[in-house]
Structures are given as C-alpha cells and as structure tokens.
Image (spheres, rainbow, N blue to C red):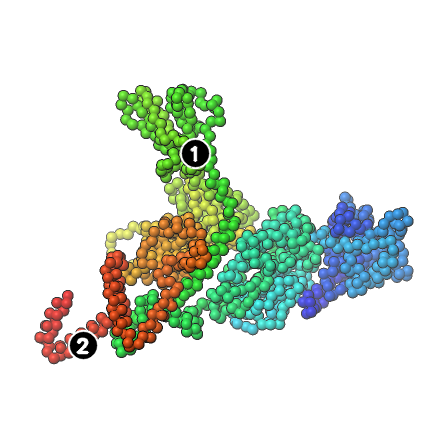
C-alpha cells in the first residue's frame, strides 16, 4: 500500500505491517517476555506514584487502525511488545504477573509460542490466551477477564475503595481509535461497573518504553543514519543545485522531493527495502522571513528565498523514528553567523547536561545558561518552550518533552531528539550593513535558526547519532560576490562627495582640473593608474570608519562579559605565601653551632648567628652575598630584600608580595656582615649560599615555565582498524638540540609522533586551535603545522607551535664550478624528479590531512586544516630576518623559518601601519592583541607595493586598521590603554565630553575630515570678487606659515613628494622649454645648440 499524505496536518501515515500469521509473522518470544517483564516490574514497583495512578491492574486495549494518527500510544505499545499491531485486542496485566489476552483465533495462534515458554526468573507468572467467541458475544471471556483482574467483586462490601484500572485514557471510548467487535462491549462493561475507577497509565508506559534495549538502539541508529543520508545526499545536493541554477522552487515542492527520497532511498543509492521505510511527517522547508521551529510547522507554497533556509525531516525505519533539522545560511551577515555559533554552543551544553541521573529540566536550563554565559540573554526569549522530546516507536512522546518543568530523571538508554531552535530573532539594519546589495538577507526583519539531532544517553552523556555536519563552514554559502561599493553609493550624492573628498585627502590631489589649465601628457598615464588606487582607498576608508565603530561596540560587550565572568577570578593569586623554614627549633640540624654561618640545603635556608642565637633566613629573602678579598680576617656580607629600595628583576614574585604586604608596619634587615679569622668556613658558606640561590632561581623559572600548562587527556590509541600515518617526518622544535625524525599517527582522540629514538609527543584534537597544511610550491619543504590552545612540554620547554615537515630538496647542494648547459639532460632529469617528488609529497600530506579530519569528526572532535593564501603573501621582517608571510583563514603565518610567526586573527584587536610616507620605500605593521597586557606583534620592512593588498585583506576580514608617518612607543601606549576603562567609549567620565573612541586616535585622517574638505571646497567657489584679494592674501600668509613649519619639522618628515599641482606646473614649464629649444634649433642650428648646451651646464 502506498503511504497517504494528509496535507491538512502534513503527517505521512505509513502502511500497516502484516498482522496475520499467514504472512509469515513470528513472535520474538524472548523479546516479548523481556519487555513485558520491564513493564510489569516498573508497574508493581512504582504503581503508587502519579505515573501509574495507583492502578490495581492494567487493561491495555488496541482498537482498529486509525490512519489520522499513526502514533497512538496503543499502536506504539503493540509495536514495542509484539513487533506488530494486533488490532481489536485486549491485554490485561495483574500485579501478580498474570497476563491475559483476548483476541481473534489467528492472533492467539501468533502468540501461542509464548504460552509454554515463560523464561525462568521472569516476573510474568502466566500467559492466558482467550479466543473470541461469537456464540455468546464473549460473555464468558469478559467474565474471565474480570475475575483474573480482580474486578468481579465489589470492594465496597469489604469497606475498600474502588478498584483502579490503568488504561490509555486518551483512547478510551474514542470510536475512531478504540472500537471493534471485542473492544466496544468490553469497554462498556467496565464503564458500567460502579466499583471501577479508570486511571491513566500512559506516562508510566512511556517511561518504560523510553529506555531502549540493545536491539532498539541498533534499529534507531540505522534509522538515524537513514535521516542523515537523506539530509546529506538528498537535501544538501538538491539545495545546492537549485541555488547554482537559480531555479524558482516553492517550499512545498522541495519538501515533496525530500519526501519522495525518504520513501524510496534508492534515489540516493541506498540499498534499503522500500517497505521498511517511510516518512515520519511531511518535511518542513522554510525561508523568506516566515519561520516556525515547532514540529507541527508546515511547508508553505511560497517560493524559496536564498537567505536563511531551515529544513526538517524525519525517517521511519522498521517503525522506529528519527528526526534531523539543519539551517543553511546564504550570504549570512556576521551577526547571523555569530548567533548560529552560539546556538551550536548551546547544543553542546545540552549534550553535556544529558547525564544519567540528571533531570530533564536541567537540559533546558543548560541551554539558557549557555546563552547567558555568552552575553546573549536576548536569545532566551527566542527559545521555544520545548527543545526536544523522547523518540522511538512513538515520534514525539508528549510525556517526555525537554522543557524547563519536567522532573523526569534521565536514564542510560534513553533516546531524545534534541531540537534547539531560535525563532523571531531580530535582524538590525547595522547587522545587514555589510551584506551584499543583492543578498536576500537584506529583506529580512527577523529570522530563525534550528539544529535538531538524534541523541542517545550513554554513561558519558549525550551521544549524537545523526552526524551530518553543522559547522558554520559546512552550512554557509556565498552566492553574491562582494562588489565595489563605490558603485552602490553612487545613488547617494552626499556619500559620493564624501568619498571623493576623502580620496583627495588621502592622495593629496584634486580630482577636478581648473579650467584652462593644460595637463601634461607624460603624467596622463600615471594619473589614470592612480585614480583606481585612490578610489579603492576611499572605499576602504569608509568601510574602516564603519567597521571601527562596530568593533568598538563589540569590544565593549566582550570586556563587560569578561569583567562579569572573572571579577572574583584572580584574588587568590594575589595573596602572598608565607615562608616557613622550620616549625620549631627542634627541627634545626644537629650540627648547628652558636657562632657559625650554616647553610641547610634541604630546608632552603641560611642559619645566621644573631647575638649567639642561630636564626634561619629563607634563601628567597637574600638579595645577594659578597665575599671581599681576605686580609687579616675574612668578611661575609649578606644583603636582604627590603622595603624602600629597588628589589630588582631577579627578585622572586612571592618575595615581592611579602615585602609589599609588610612594608607599612614591619622593620626589615637590610644587610648583615660576619667576620672570621678562619676563612674556610665563611668561604664554604659563601659558595653554598650561591649554589642554593642558583637552584632556587632555576626552580622558580621552571615553575613559571610550567605555570599555564594544562593537564592533557590521555591518548586513546585506535585498535582494530588502520591508523592514518605519515612516515619519515622531521619535527620542529627539536628535542634537546638534535634533529628529531619519526612517524606521525592519527588516533581516536589525538595525534602521536614517535621519533626514531623513541621520544613521544602527543597532540590532542581538543587542544588544536589551528591546523595548517602548507604544500610545497616555492619552498624546499611540505609541512603540517599545529597552533595549540594550551602549550605542551617538548623536552624541557613548553611549546605552543608544533610542526612536522619533509624536505623536497636539500637546503644546500654541492655544485661543481664547471659550466653546465641549460639543455643538460642530467639537470633536466633532476628537475623532473624534483617536480614529481613535490607532487607526490603534496598529495601524501593532503590525503593525511583529510584522514585526520575524518578521524576527528568520527570521534566528535573538530579539526580543520587551513592552507595559506599564497597570492596574498608579502615579504616582511617579524623576527630579525626577511621572510615570506602569508595569511590563512584564521591566522597570519610564516612557517618555513624559525622561530615561527603565527598570529591568531581572532586575538587581533587592531592593526596599525607605521612609517607610511611618500618618501619611504617600506613600512611597518603592528598587530595589537586584544589582551592589552601583551605587547603587539610586529612585521617590519614591508614593501610599499603590498600596502593596498594588505589593507584590502584586513577590511575583508573585518579587522580595523590605521596608519601614521612615524614609529610609536607601544609599551607606553599599551600601558595607557590598559588603564583606561572608557577606552572604547566616545565620551569622557562625565559622559558628556566627546573623545575619540578606541583606536581612532591613531587615524591619520579623522571621521570628519571629509566634511571639512567639502566645506573648504565650497568656500573656494562661494567668495565674491570683493573678498578675493583678502583670500589670496590669507592663502599667501598660510603658504608662508606652512613653509616655516616645514623648515622646523623633523628631517624624517621633510622629504615629501610634490603634489599634483606642482608636478603639473613643472611638466608644463618643461614642455614650453622644449618647444622653445626646438624652434631655436631650427632658426640657428649649431650656434643655438651650443648656447643651449651651455645653459644646460649652468642649470646643473
């Protein structure tokens, strides 16, 4: 039978499976008793609580097939218990373990194998099968059921209350779903019994069925794989084709195509019998601003929009349901992408909360807490009341919904559909500002996001069963390429004027030529070439002004969250640790003499005689020790750290805190001098004190080195399958100054490098912040680089960057002095072999990276390899050596030379360009860290030709930048910025006085420069004749003052290039001089040429 689609409810009714024995149906006896025993045990153990209503027996009826609701609890119960639906059947279960079934003859024959095969130890004590009797309309059968259930006697005669019968209350008496030749008279007989009270046991049955056994989990995994495959090979590919071909498709049409794939998996090359699969509901496709994240939503007949698309689908395999939902972002603004990442973080928090023993409401609370933790309280109101439900034979169990009120305890084996959705999220105009003008997202006022996955509860928490990718990079698409925004701003004359004015300011050039002035032909080509540069710079400058304002707001929010999160964080670290050498005098060494300087290496102290009493001083209190040249007597002077004087850089951190703590009220010993006629004892004490100070200093440096090390998890080695491996690699940094070679393997939760000398380095997937694969093109090596979140120890040093590489050619080759022809066959063969080796190694490393990504993804880790953008690279000097620096998706790197240069772009707050002048051939770039306590990273001596490309890239990456003509004192700047709480605000502490917000004070041209330039232009043309002379005089005065200021300026700033007017004027004079000279040559050849030659000499 073909499934029928109910368009009113968008629920697909699956065709019923066979229920008669003639079609070869067999009862799984062991499974039947195991599941019936689970229900009976839960019923007898917890029947007094609300989920079972205090029932004395269970009467679980199954009526006729009801096509409008395929997920009736009785239908799901029969599928769970028998594997089939036995319609028009009565099942009675008593507290003492008796099970009585009334059904037709064929159904009783189907159940008969279980009658004589009750397993030992089962709580079920007996199974009675009653065949339908048409002769007496089942009167005798009903009497038997009443007697076995204990309903034949009126409890009121014994003073007892009514007998409570547990039923599926929602279905009881419903003619559509609970009727039949057996059921209708049976239910009437119970209803007529005054001593019987009906109670609902649906919640109790749901709780038992929610915990899946091994067989159910296996089927649900297959069902989840089916939904996953349909999403991956059906939905995603079809959606990409629609977008690429720009087809017009309605939501309902696309949903129908998805539904057809679920019904016939062979369309995506899945070898699954059609009779075993069906849709749980009609798929939901939404876009265009009209969203509903509930499972009852419907696909409309409106056209699909290329903005934010949500797709939800559910597949049913062997009557077990699964569900998956994904959101696809087309040209998403940064705000939408950030919200989506917050949504994924909330899902991770919910998975962690799915621990056995927790309450269901804790899952909902984890999502809310995550939003609050990330400072997105505005998203809490967008969260629906339910974020998932229990799933299995029943698609959505209403008794086990993931909400903020459910007190049901999570148990291992439960399976939920975790559906985190956000609806009606406001999309502001500022958030849409950086979108492409053609993007459909600009038409949205609000949007929705949803991610739904199948999750099974294990002893370690929630485990996702639908593993289709949902990272931002996997569901985001860029359809409309960014265009020059200069054209988009042409409609607004004011903006165009601003851009032109700002461009003139940057280039020191007037766009308009004064009428009557002649342009030089030799400058025409250069002027056209410069025009594109000027316009591009103006567009970038406008973007940067908007970007800096937006970044200031974002940084204010980040700092507020960090301040709120860590306000009590570091109080303990500021406390000074008190020094203790000995608890009591009895602990002194045995050989201490009253007037002797003694060094106790074990207790880290020096025992000094004071008035004949030995007094211990901790070694960390001693600043230095001096032993002058011995004369008649030997002197030993010991200096201590004291308040009121400079303690020096080598002072221990704890000693500094102790001095500051006790400085206000304690007296300090500054120095002590000891004299002895025996030089040997003081000399020995001097050497021991020096040695102890050295050891203590090394210990402190080692602790400081290991202070921020994080305990790494233990590597879990992969077994029973092939491990991805790269052989003959060299690792940097090296162990103990030696070249470290070995093999790199990818295991379950990390990578392991084993050197040829047996040294091991483990890199956990969870500790990898950025993974970079750099193929060999212009270098001598192909490499894989890992930038870590937390440093690890390599040898005796902690390292945050680990690299593995293979050299394609030797760094140095011996070449004979003889000349070789360019057509030398041997040399051509060497080059060919080198090209082949490069290609082979690049492919091997690329394949290894792909396998590492797959291994990590399979084990619920995220590792993505970036490849540097070589066409955006530039030469620069980050570490006292000129190297080639390239950007990746997340970093700015140089990986071929050591020390490595890796700057994480997410940590960069601002970029400033120094020494940007017309005279200089190179400039410097300073990358300011978001942590103001860290000094900025620098790249010096970058060629001027790369400046525009770097600034264009920074603008695309939404990183603000400024430029200036001189080098700045960044140490002092960072100290000032770190101490300013209102750095990113545009007002002073009085909140009235305006100031430059954030890094705007570094801008060479401020935001208002364009307006000022416009006003200057207008003033030039608005003056009357009467005021023209006055303006000329003022301009002469201004020029005079400017020349004076130039004279007084720094020599570094004096060498400025000529502006366009000067160049035009000089070119015109040269043209006139040339024309005059040509005329003179014609009139009087040799003599004129001679005089001209003399003039040239004099000009020189």
Q: Is residue 440 left or right of residue 506?
A: right
Q: Is residue 730 left or right of residue 919?
A: right
Position in image of residue 1067 (x %, y %): 23, 72
Quadrant of the drawing holding the C terminus: bottom left
x 49%, y 50%: residue: 563
Q: Which mark is residue 1075?
A: 2
SS of the residue at dot 2?
helix
Residue at the bottom extreme, as displayed: 1083
Give whichever of 901, 860 is nearer the camera: 901
Q: Which mark is residue 762?
A: none
Quadrant of the drawing holding the N terminus: bottom right
x 38%, y 65%: residue: 1008
Q: Quadrant of residue 874?
A: bottom left
Position in image of residue 478 (x %, y %): 49, 65
SS of the residue at dot 1?
loop
Q: Quadrant of residue 1015?
A: bottom left
x 40%, y 72%: residue: 496
Mark toward the start of the polypeptide (2 vs 1):
1
Does the image show residue 1029? yes
Residue at the left extreme, as displayed: 1087
- As drawn, 408 above or below 508: above
Tell me whether the residue at label 2 lies in contact with that at label 1, contact meaning CB atoms closer than 8 angstroms. Answer: no
Residue wearing tag 1 = 665
Q: Is residue 147 left or right of residue 458?
A: right
- As drawn, 542 above or below 117: below
Q: CA distance from mark 2 to mark 1?
A: 91 Å
């Amino acid at each position: 039978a073909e499934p029928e689609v109910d368009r009113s409810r968008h629920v697909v009714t699956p065709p019923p499976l066979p229920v008669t024995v003639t079609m070869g149906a067999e009862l799984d006896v062991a499974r039947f008793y195991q599941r019936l025993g689970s229900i009976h045990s839960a019923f007898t153990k917890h029947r007094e609580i609300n989920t079972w209503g205090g029932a004395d027996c269970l009467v679980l009826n199954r009526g006729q097939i009801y096509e409008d609701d395929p997920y009736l609890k009785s239908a799901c119960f029969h599928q769970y218990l028998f594997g089939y639906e036995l319609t028009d059947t009565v099942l009675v279960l008593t507290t003492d373990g008796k099970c009585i079934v009334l059904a037709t003859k064929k159904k009783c024959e189907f159940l008969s194998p279980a009658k004589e095969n009750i397993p030992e130890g089962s709580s079920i004590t007996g199974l009675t099968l009653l065949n339908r009797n048409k002769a007496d309309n089942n009167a005798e059968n009903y009497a038997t059921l009443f007697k076995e259930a204990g309903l034949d006697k009126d409890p009121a005669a014994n003073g007892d209350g009514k007998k409570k019968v547990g039923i599926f209350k929602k279905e009881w008496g419903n003619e559509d779903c609970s009727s039949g030749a057996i059921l209708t008279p049976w239910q009437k007989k119970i209803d007529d019994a005054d001593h019987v009270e009906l109670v609902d046991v649906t919640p109790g049955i749901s709780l038992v069925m929610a915990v899946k056994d091994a067989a159910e989990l296996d089927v649900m995994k297959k069902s989840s794989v089916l939904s996953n495959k349909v999403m991956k090979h059906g939905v995603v590919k079809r959606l990409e084709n629609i977008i690429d071909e720009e087809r017009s498709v309605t939501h309902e049409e696309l949903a129908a195509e998805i539904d057809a794939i679920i019904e016939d998996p062979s369309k995506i090359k899945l070898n699954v019998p059609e009779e075993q699969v069906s849709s749980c509901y009609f798929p939901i496709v939404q876009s265009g601003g009209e969203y509903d994240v509930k499972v009852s939503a419907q696909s409309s007949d409106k056209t699909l929009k290329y903005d934010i698309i949500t797709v939800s689908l559910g597949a049913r395999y062997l009557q077990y349901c699964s569900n998956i939902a994904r959101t696809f972002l087309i040209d998403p603004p940064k705000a939408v992408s950030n919200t989506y990442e917050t949504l994924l973080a909330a899902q991770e928090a919910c998975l962690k909360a799915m621990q056995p023993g927790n309450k269901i409401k804790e899952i909902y609370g984890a999502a809310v807490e995550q939003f609050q933790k990330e400072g997105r309280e505005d998203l809490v109101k967008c969260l629906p009341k339910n974020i998932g439900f229990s799933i299995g034979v029943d698609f959505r169990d209403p008794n086990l919904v993931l909400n903020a009120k459910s007190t049901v305890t999570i148990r291992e084996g439960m399976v939920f559909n975790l559906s985190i959705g956000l609806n009606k999220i406001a999309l502001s105009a500022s958030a849409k500002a950086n979108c492409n003008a053609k993007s459909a997202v600009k038409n949205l006022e609000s949007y929705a996001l949803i991610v739904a996955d199948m999750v099974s509860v294990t002893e370690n928490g929630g485990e996702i069963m639908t593993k289709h990718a949902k990272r931002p990079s996997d569901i985001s698409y860029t359809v409309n390429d960014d265009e020059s925004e200069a054209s988009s701003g042409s409609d607004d004359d004011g903006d165009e004027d601003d851009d032109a004015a700002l461009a003139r300011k940057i280039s020191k050039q007037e766009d308009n030529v004064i009428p009557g002035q002649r342009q030089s032909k030799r400058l025409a080509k250069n002027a056209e070439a410069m025009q594109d540069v000027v316009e591009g710079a103006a567009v970038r400058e406008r973007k940067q002004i908007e970007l800096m304002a937006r970044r200031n707001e974002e940084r204010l929010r980040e700092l507020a969250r960090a301040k709120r999160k860590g306000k009590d964080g570091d109080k303990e670290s500021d406390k000074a640790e008190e020094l203790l050498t000995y608890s009591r005098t009895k602990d002194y060494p045995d050989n201490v003499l009253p007037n002797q300087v003694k060094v106790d290496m074990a207790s880290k102290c020096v025992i000094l005689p004071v008035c004949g009493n030995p007094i211990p001083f901790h070694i960390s209190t001693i600043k230095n020790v001096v032993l002058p040249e011995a004369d008649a007597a030997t002197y030993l002077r010991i200096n201590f750290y004291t308040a009121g004087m400079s303690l020096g850089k080598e002072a221990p951190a704890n000693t500094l805190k102790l001095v500051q703590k006790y400085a206000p009220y304690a007296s300090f010993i500054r120095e002590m001098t000891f004299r002895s006629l025996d030089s040997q004892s003081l000399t020995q004490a001097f050497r021991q004190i020096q040695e102890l100070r050295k050891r203590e200093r090394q210990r402190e440096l080692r602790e400081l080195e290991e202070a921020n090390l994080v305990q790494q998890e233990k590597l879990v080695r992969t077994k029973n399958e092939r491990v991805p491996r790269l052989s003959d690699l060299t690792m940097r940094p090296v162990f103990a100054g030696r070249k470290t070679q070995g093999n790199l393997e990818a295991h379950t939760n990390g990578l392991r490098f084993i050197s040829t000398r047996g040294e091991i380095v483990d890199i956990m997937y969870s500790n990898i912040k950025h993974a970079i694969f750099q193929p060999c093109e212009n270098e001598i090596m192909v490499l894989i680089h890992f930038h870590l979140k937390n440093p690890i120890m390599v040898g005796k040093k902690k390292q945050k960057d680990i690299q593995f590489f293979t050299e394609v050619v030797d760094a140095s080759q011996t070449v004979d002095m003889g000349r070789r022809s360019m057509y030398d066959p041997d040399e051509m063969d060497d080059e060919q072999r080198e090209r082949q080796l490069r290609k082979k190694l690049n492919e091997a490393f690329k394949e290894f990276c792909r396998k590492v990504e797959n291994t990590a993804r399979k084990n619920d880790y995220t590792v993505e390899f970036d490849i540097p953008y070589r066409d955006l690279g530039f030469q620069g000097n980050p570490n006292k050596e000129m190297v080639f620096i390239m950007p990746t998706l997340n970093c700015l790197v140089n990986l071929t030379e050591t020390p490595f240069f890796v700057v994480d772009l997410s940590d960069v707050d601002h970029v400033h360009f120094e020494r940007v002048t017309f005279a200089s051939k190179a400039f410097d770039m300073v990358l300011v860290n978001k942590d103001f306590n860290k000094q900025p990273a620098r790249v010096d001596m970058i060629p001027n030709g790369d400046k525009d490309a770097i600034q264009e890239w920074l603008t695309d990456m939404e990183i603000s930048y400024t430029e200036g003509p001189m080098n700045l004192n960044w140490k002092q700047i960072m100290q000032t910025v770190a101490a300013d709480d209102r750095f990113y605000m545009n007002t002073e502490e009085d909140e009235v006085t305006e100031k430059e917000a954030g890094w705007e004070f570094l801008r060479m041209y401020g935001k208002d420069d364009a307006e000022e330039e416009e006003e200057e232009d207008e003033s030039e043309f608005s003056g009357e004749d009467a005021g023209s002379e006055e303006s000329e005089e003022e301009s002469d005065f201004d020029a005079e003052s400017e020349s004076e200021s130039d004279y007084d300026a720094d020599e570094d700033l004096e060498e400025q290039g000529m502006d366009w007017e000067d160049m035009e004027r000089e070119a015109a004079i040269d043209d006139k001089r040339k024309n005059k000279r040509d005329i003179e040559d014609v009139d009087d050849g040799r003599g004129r040429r001679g005089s001209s030659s003399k003039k040239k000499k004099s000009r020189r």
